[in-house]
Image: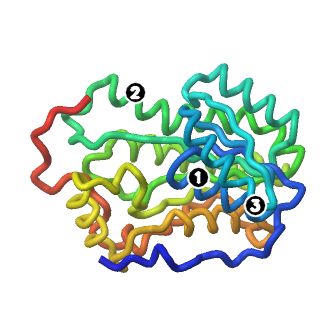
């Protein structure tokens, strides 16, 4: 397995976003942490949202050495009233030039073993919550002619075994993104989705996940995972003047995974374990 995670993808100029503000959900760990810190490094004032206080505090400490700033609040994006109030508070305080919908999650199971509750929970987190945050941010995005980037999955438009619930939800986000790109274009608001490949984060770095990780990377034509830093740089690019005419897109940064066998959490024989 080739690992290019040590190669820097940073190509954007320093202080590109000085004077601008971003709201990032799921900002405490993984891709969300990488995005938040990269935006701070580019001079942006970032407000991070997440469920757990400790990792958000860690990001704030890491951001102290950067030219931008990082403030945060603990909030469950599935709590519609709480997140709408938080977006309102952030928007009133600093405006919103960029919204990054990164919070999400799922479990792996064959479709016949996904309970109704499990299905609804994943769809609520990966679709309904994203609409709620985006709708709440709309007046502030309109005021700044801002941008929205939603983090999706590789192959969201082709399917993935073991992820029927998450693929369905994220395909919904893609449809929503393209619809809002049409509706809000007149206000200068741009909306795009990013489909990463296999990103090595806390959830895939343990010994128990090693075989799964190696199988996913092997299914990737370029035989590499997707570094979180690469995703972060692409988010920043889409928010920059260079991305000013890009809207309604699904950009797959996955080493060609969506062109090959695809990234599947089950083999063709399925699985026998019970799901939530």
Residue 26 vertical placement versus 251 (above, below): above
Residue at left offset 67%, top offset 49%: 61
Task: Write down the residue under mark 1.
Answer: 33
Which of the numbered marks, if any, corresponds to residue 66? 3
How far across and down, in percent of the image, does residue 51 sit?
55, 32
Q: Crowding near pointer 1: few (<14 within 10 Å), some, many (20+)?
A: many
Residue 233 vertical placement versus 75 (above, below): below
Badge 3 marks a residue whose secondary structure is loop
Mark nearest the camera among 1 and 2 is 1
Which of the numbered marks, if any, corresponds to residue 238? none
- Circles 1 and 2 in contact, beta carbons < 8 Å: no
How far across and down, in percent of the image, does residue 115 sit?
26, 26
- Circles 2 and 3 in contact, beta carbons < 8 Å: no
Of callouts 1 and 2, which one flags the residue occurring earlier in the amino acid sequence?
1
- Please indicate whether residue 246 sits to the left or right of residue 232 in the image: right
Of callouts 3 and 1, which one flags the residue occurring earlier in the amino acid sequence?
1
Mark nearest the camera among 2 and 3 is 3
Which of the numbered marks, if any, corresponds to residue 120? 2
How far across and down, in percent of the image, does residue 95 sit?
86, 42
Residue 124 vertical placement versus 11 (above, below): above
Distance Cα–Cα, label 2 vs label 3: 39 Å
Name which quarter of the figure residue 67 lies in.
bottom right
Residue at left offset 47%, top offset 62%: 196
Distance Cα–Cα, label 1 vs label 2: 27 Å
Residue furthest top in the image:
81
């Amino acid at each position: 397995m080739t690992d290019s995670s040590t190669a820097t993808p940073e190509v954007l100029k320093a202080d590109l976003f000085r004077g601008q503000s971003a709201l990032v959900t799921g900002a405490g760990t993984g891709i969300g942490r990488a995005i938040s810190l990269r935006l701070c490094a580019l001079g942006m004032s970032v407000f991070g949202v997440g469920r757990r206080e400790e990792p958000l505090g860690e990001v704030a400490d890491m951001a102290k050495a950067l030219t931008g700033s990082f403030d945060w609040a603990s909030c469950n994006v599935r709590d519609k009233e709480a997140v709408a109030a938080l977006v309102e508070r952030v928007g009133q305080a600093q405006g919103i030039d960029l919204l990054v919908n990164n919070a999400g999650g799922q479990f792996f199971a064959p479709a016949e073993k996904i309970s109704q509750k499990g299905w609804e929970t994943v769809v609520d987190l990966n679709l309904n919550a994203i609409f709620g945050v985006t709708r709440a941010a709309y007046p502030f995005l309109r005021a700044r002619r801002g941008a929205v980037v939603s983090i999706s999955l590789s192959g969201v438009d082709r399917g993935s075994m073991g992820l029927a619930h998450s693929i369905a939800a994220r395909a919904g986000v893609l449809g929503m993104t393209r619809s809002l790109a049409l509706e809000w274009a007149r206000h200068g608001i741009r909306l795009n989705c990013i489909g990463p490949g296999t990103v090595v984060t806390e959830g895939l770095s343990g010994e128990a996940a090693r075989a799964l990780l190696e199988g996913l990377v092997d299914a990737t034509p370029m035989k590499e995972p997707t570094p979180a830093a690469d995703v972060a740089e692409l988010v920043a690019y889409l928010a920059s003047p260079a991305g000013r005419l890009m809207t309604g897109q699904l950009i797959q940064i996955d080493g060609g995974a969506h062109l090959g066998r695809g990234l599947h959490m089950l083999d063709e024989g399925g699985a026998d374990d019970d799901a939530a």
